[in-house]
Image (cartoon, helix red, strand yellow):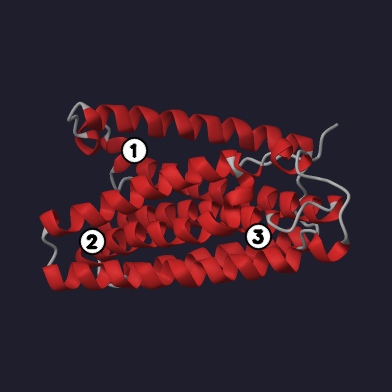
Amino acid sequence: MSIFKSGNPTLSENKFRDTVISISNENSMSIKGTLNKFGFMLLMLMGSAFYSWKEFAESEGTSSNLMPIIWGGAIGGFVIALIISFKRDWSPYLAPLYALLEGLFIGAISAMYNTIYNGIVLQAVGLTFSVGIGMYFLYSFRIIRATEKFRSILFSAMAGIAIFYLATFVLRLFHVDVDQSMPFINGGGMFGIGFSLIIVAVAAMNLILDFDMIEQGAEMGAPKYMEWYGAFGLMVTFVWLYLEILRLLSKLNRR
């Protein structure tokens, strides 16, 4: 039975196992080091998010001025994430860049949501941190364990969500108004809210697997640069969780 799996594709079994070599403790991965690096990346993300938020305010929401920031952050972050996934030893250099790019994207998107629903961003940030801290304690006290059954259920849910996201993306490429064509999912009705709650729950549970992978990497003596890789994986999940919570709150505000 393999215990070294995660729903987050950036924190998979082979990613850690392939890097494990015989090294001294001071040059190996640690949980504290990973969390410290995650905190540093979070500060960088918040800094670039503040910049794009400010740009939104100064441009008064003009889409032509915001699109380069939004698409630059989204596409740039995606490309960097792909590179890191294949070049793990580049994590110390690329993980901070990923945080900066994602911050640009999140800041602009958050500003747009906040214009429509005043105060929603502060609520989303608070809930994201609360969920993250809650999941960490649930994992630390072994209230929720990353068992094989837990992983199997979560993997199935992740696959379904990924297919849905892909289908939505393709439809948007063909200029299909997804919000109008699937109002029962994207609207503020009970079904739409329930759908968002499920995705938020899956994202939150994925943190359990991320924490488990980081702990296993530290126990196996993964190289020091894997701290950056682990922090990057956590950042990917936290960004996803925040965006889904933001979307859920927007649906609740439509009622």
> In the rendering, at what x and y percent does residue 87 appear?
59, 42
Q: What crowding class fits label 3: few (fewer than 14 Cα within 10 Å), some (14-19), or many (20 or more)? A: some
Q: Earlier in the sequence, mark 1 or mark 3?
A: 3
Q: Nearer the observer, disc 3 or disc 2?
A: 2
Q: Closer to the camera, 40 or 211?
A: 40
Position of residue 21 in the picture relative to residue 98 (left or right): right
Q: Secondary structure at mark 3?
A: helix
Task: Identify the residue at image location x=41%, y=31%.
Answer: 164
The residue that label 1 is drawn on is: 185
Q: Secondary structure at mark 2?
A: helix
Residue 251 vertical placement versus 178 (above, below): below
The residue that label 3 is drawn on is: 135
Q: Amino acid at mark 1?
A: Ile
Task: Identify the residue at image location x=58%, y=70%.
Answer: 39
Q: Closer to the camera, 189 or 10?
A: 10
| Tag 3–tag 2 contact (CB < 8 Å) | no
